[in-house]
Amino acid sequence: MTFLYKADPVRGAEWAALFAEKAPDLPFRIWPDFGDPGRVRYLAAWLPPDDLERRFPNLELLFSVGAGIDQFDLGALPPDLPVVRMTEPGITAGMVEYVTMAVLGLHRDLPAYLDGQRRREWRPLRVQPAAKRRVGVLGLGRLARAVLDRLAAFGFPLAGWSRSRREIPGVACHAGPDELPAMLERSDILVCLLPLTDATRGILGAGLFSRLPQGAALVHVGRGPQLDHDALLAALDGGRLSAVWLDVTEPEPLPADHRLWSHPKVVLTPHIASMTQPETAVDLVLDAIRRHRAGEPLPGLVDRARGY
Ligand SMILES: NC(=O)c1ccc[n+]([C@@H]2O[C@H](COP(=O)([O-])OP(=O)(O)OC[C@H]3O[C@@H](n4cnc5c(N)ncnc54)[C@H](OP(=O)(O)O)[C@@H]3O)[C@@H](O)[C@H]2O)c1
């Protein structure tokens, strides 16, 4: 049986070295060198090849090399093929670092100071205590919970929003569309950590912005299509939002003449909030294969009906 990798080839070479060390009995191949297609049992991909069922009739597990699976066309996959998303701890650690940086950066007015520096303007703003800066997180999943845990240490009043009801000590939890407005109304800094699904596409738009406190700030680390750029620019220009820290856009990269590149209230990074770390990813994948063989539950198994 073969493990096939189909994503960035440089990282694939790192996976190959780790497989050779940790699972020498499991042949590892990098797309398009898949060898005998009948032997391919496991596939780790960013974008799986078309016609998976016909190409690899004995495929048992499909791994996403990223935390999300929105890049997969779930309807085109064999209906019974288990799809496993990447839940390795390196992704979580990276996201905690990034969102902490962004929330602290917005809390301490970094976009205004970067703009002031460019203009050679020495303009101190009043420092707000963290206890008076309310942070709300859209999504209460694996990444959001780790982020909230770290943010708690600074003393920000915390809230979160999920699809199903969650309980997290120290976090005001809200569930479902009916409770979203209440959560938005108490979010001076809003963080989006939602997966991209039909229900979350375009969620960061004019309607949502209008529910936030005047001058609120946004950190967007979900997926680009969740954000309406025109509504965002209008909210920034009109003062409804004071600043935004963006890691994801649609498209990626943005066109060279897009206003978000140079807007003084925008910090923009190229979808780097967190990345799968080969070492821990290979450990996770090998553990999932072991569990699959033993008939045990798989961590990160995607619920296809839910879409994440
Ligand atoms: N920028 C980057 O570099 C980067 C890196 C990694 C991940 N990400 C993004 O982060 C996302 C979240 O990752 P994760 O591992 O934390 O996912 P997860 O564990 O599946 O958590 C998703 C959370 O979103 C909630 N949710 C989903 N649909 C919802 C809806 N319609 N209404 C309200 N809440 C909803 C879920 O609610 P329930 O709790 O009720 O299920 C859950 O709390 C990924 O899908 C990916 O898009 C970005």
Image (cartoon, rainbow, N blue to C red):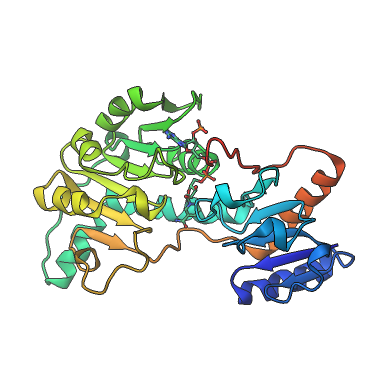
Q: Is residue 40 left or right of residue 78?
A: right
Does 41 sit above or below residue 82? below
Q: Quadrant of the N terminus?
A: bottom right
Q: Residue at x 55, y 41 (%)?
A: 142
Q: Is residue 15 left or right of residue 180?
A: right
Does 3 sit above or below residue 194? below
Q: Farthest residue toward the right?
A: 25
Quarter of the image where one finds residue 233 = bottom left
Q: Is residue 274 left or right of residue 172?
A: right
Q: Residue at x 80, y 45 (%)?
A: 292
Residue 287 seen in render: yes
Front residue of this view, candidates 239 and 115: 239
Across and down, in percent, residue 250 comes to 34, 59
Q: How many marks?
A: 0
Front residue of this view, candidates 49 and 62: 49
Residue 280 seen in render: no
Across and down, in percent, residue 177 comes to 36, 27
Q: Quadrant of the C terminus?
A: top right
Front residue of this view, candidates 272 and 63: 63
Does 224 sit above or below residue 137? below
Q: Residue at x 48, y 41 (%)?
A: 144
Across and down, in percent, residue 26 comes to 85, 64
Front residue of this view, candidates 162 and 280: 162
Quarter of the image where one finds residue 181 = top left
Q: Farthest residue toward the front?
A: 54
Q: Residue at x 64, y 44 (%)?
A: 300
Across and down, in percent, residue 119 comes to 12, 71
